Image: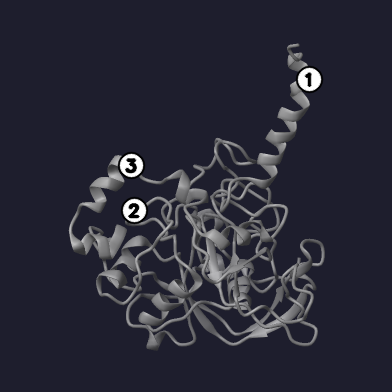
């Protein structure tokens, strides 16, 4: 006996809702913080990497290219413009607010901390930046990456790949504390630009034409500094959305209990690192400054990138050192929100 079409609707609705909540591996933060981490057990092309994977004919043509192309991967034909070309922004020493008392458990507590002066790259490391390192045989080619372009953020790199690049240009990955201060400013804003979400100020919220920013944002990484109106209080770009960014986690001590949801001890697992900032395909979360995504250090995907930081710009081999703009300086003043 043929079933009535209406009888299948609840199951279809359930399957559709499940897909929307869980998503495909690698795109956005889902209901469980281990959803993305679990895909690393059998690391394959996932998330944006799968969505933008080359057709079979293109992959076959690529595999038949020169030995140099095979070794350098997508960087073989990329015209590099020099390593570490992103301008540096000085983040002044002083106190700031970190964390949240109302959101994810591993963001708690909101607390007043202090950091010494440091510098951070104004935008995410681009393909041309990273490919210069690959072509110098100092960095490993990206894998499981998203779209490729000179001014697009490089993706498809593990935590250690990102750290190796920063070390090559005499810098390092930022700590979580540095990243959050650079993103949220001394007042601990909810978003880099203020306390209200805005699709016009960051590339987030669109995955396969669904999400709060569908029709407003592209649903894929955009060229760096495409959303200048979303700059942080210090004038740093793209701290919300575009691509997740690797940071160095701080091992919890005393009252600083920033731990993984699934780690009941007050220490951070040595095999994990933390990505910050959300991505273009973050649909079921807002790109809040306090948001954290613990992942295996070996994990790679098409919406995970990075930027570098330094204690002293004099040790950095290249780059322009710029102070925050007058507008950004004005935004760092004021009382706690």
Give the number of the disc on residue 7.
1
Tag 2 near tag 3, CB within 8 Å: no
Of badges 2 and 3, nearer the viewer stands: 3
Choose the circle earlier in sequence order: 2 or 3.
3
From where the camera sits, is residue 192 visible?
no
Q: Earlier in the sequence, mark 1 or mark 3?
A: 1
Q: Is residue 298 above or below residue 152?
A: below
Count how many numbered circles sit on residues in the image: 3
Q: Residue at x 57, y 64 (%)?
A: 232
Residue 266 seen in the figure: yes
Q: Dot 2 lies on which element?
A: loop
Tell me the crowding category of disc 2: few under 14, some 14 to 19, or many 20 or more residues within 10 angstroms, Cα based.
Answer: some
Q: Residue at x 51, y 54 (%)?
A: 242
Q: Is residue 274 left or right of residue 77?
A: right
For this rendering, which residue is in front, 106 or 195? 106
Q: Is residue 98 left or right of residue 154?
A: right
> Where, by quadrant of the figure, is residue 40 drawn?
bottom right
Q: Provide residue 173's location: percent of width, then percent of height.
A: 50, 77
Label 3: element kind: helix
Disc 3: which residue: 56
In the rendering, at what x and y percent does residue 186 appear? 66, 74
Q: Nearer the viewer, mark 2 or mark 1?
A: 1
Spatial CA span between label 2 and label 3: 20 Å
* Residue 288 percent coordinates (x, y): 67, 59
Q: Residue at x 76, y 11 (%)?
A: 1
- Crowding near pointer 1: few (<14 within 10 Å), some, many (20+)? few
Marks 2 and 1 sit apart, C-alpha to C-alpha, by: 48 Å
- Assign the C terminus to one quadrant of the image: bottom right
- Name the residue carrying label 2: 149
């Amino acid at each position: 006996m043929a079933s009535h079409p209406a009888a299948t609707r609840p199951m279809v609705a359930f399957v559709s809702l499940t897909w929307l909540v869980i998503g495909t591996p690698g795109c956005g933060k889902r209901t469980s913080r281990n959803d993305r981490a679990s895909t690393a057990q059998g690391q394959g092309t996932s998330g944006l990497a799968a969505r933008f994977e080359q057709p079979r004919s293109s992959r076959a043509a690529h595999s038949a290219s020169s030995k140099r192309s095979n070794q350098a991967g997508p960087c073989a034909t990329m015209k590099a413009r020099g390593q570490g070309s992103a301008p540096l922004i000085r983040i002044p020493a002083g106190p700031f607010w970190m964390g949240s008392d109302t959101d994810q458990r591993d963001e708690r507590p909101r607390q007043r901390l202090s950091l010494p002066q440091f510098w951070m790259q104004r935008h995410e490391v681009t393909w041309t930046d990273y490919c210069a390192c690959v072509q110098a045989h100092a960095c490993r080619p990206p894998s499981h990456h998203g779209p490729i372009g000179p001014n697009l953020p490089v993706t498809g790199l593990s935590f250690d790949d990102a750290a190796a690049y920063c070390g090559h240009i005499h810098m390092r990955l930022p700590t979580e504390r540095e990243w959050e201060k650079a993103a949220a400013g001394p007042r601990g804003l909810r978003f880099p630009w203020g306390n209200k979400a805005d699709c016009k100020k960051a590339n987030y919220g669109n995955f396969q034409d669904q999400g709060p920013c569908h029709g407003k944002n592209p649903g894929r990484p955009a060229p760096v500094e495409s959303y200048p109106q979303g700059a942080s209080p210090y004038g740093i770009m793209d701290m919300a959305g575009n691509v997740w960014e690797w940071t160095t986690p701080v091992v919890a001590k005393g009252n600083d209990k920033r731990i993984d949801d699934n780690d009941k001890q007050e220490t951070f697992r040595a095999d994990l690192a933390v990505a910050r900032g959300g991505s273009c395909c973050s649909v079921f979360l807002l790109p809040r400054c306090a948001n954290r995504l613990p992942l295996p250090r070996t994990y790679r995907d098409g919406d995970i990138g990075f930027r570098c930081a330094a204690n002293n710009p004099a040790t950095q081999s290249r780059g322009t050192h710029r102070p925050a703009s007058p507008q950004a300086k004005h935004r760092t003043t004021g009382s706690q929100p």
